Image (cartoon, rainbow, N blue to C red):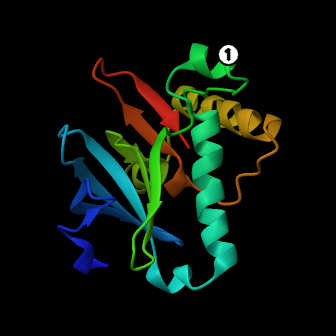
Amino acid sequence: MEELLGRILGQKYQLIRKIGEGGMGSVWEAEHAAIRRRVAVKVMHRTEDESPEKRKRFFREAKAAGEIGHPNIREAKAAGEIGHPNIIEIYDVGVEEDGTAYMVMELLNGVSLGELLLKCKALPAGKTVAIVVQVLSALHATHEKGIIHRDLKPDNVFLSVDARMREDVKL
């Protein structure tokens, strides 16, 4: 997947650096060419592309997150969507001519729960409760929409820190 470094997807998202690897794909920091906005881009593994069912699941994940994690909660509710602050925002999806499938998401600042647990081994009770409450809130929102999160693990729970140094959990 290192051959993706510098590649431009969708004629606008230049892959800058690899920031993670998962079962279905790798995640890259990228920059929108026209507006210079930094985003995260999940690129589906090429070996997975050959399975139509896995490709459908990849795009179902993007659609589900896009519907639930709507960036404007008022607008989302008016449109009948849920809108949830603990679901990562999805901005775009696409498939390149060579079959490379990708989804563009908000770029988060922080660490995964998995990374934090490797460093700390145990978390204070208050922090643990705060994380679990936000995870359960996000899962409740997905279940209300009829979506089951099939890969819930510490590496898929992200502790995001915003500009005001507030920590939010994102699935």
Question: Pointer 1: residues within 10 angstroms few (<14), some, or many (20+)?
Answer: few
Depth check: give the residue in front, 163 or 103: 103
Q: As drawn, is 129 to the left or to the right of 16? A: right
Depth check: give the residue in front, 110 or 10: 10
Quadrant holding the C terminus: top right
- Name the residue type under label 1: Ala
Q: Is residue 152 visible?
A: no
Q: Is residue 58 visible?
A: yes
Residue 4 in the image: state x and y as whole percent: 26, 73
Question: In the rendered view, would you say 121 is above or below 50?
Answer: above
Residue 43 in the image: state x and y as whole percent: 41, 66
Residue 31 in the image: state x and y as whole percent: 22, 49
Residue topped by disc 1: 78
Depth check: give the residue in front, 81 or 161: 81
Residue 13 in the image: state x and y as whole percent: 27, 54
Question: Residue, x 26% and y 53% (percent of image)?
Answer: 12
Quadrant holding the N terminus: bottom left
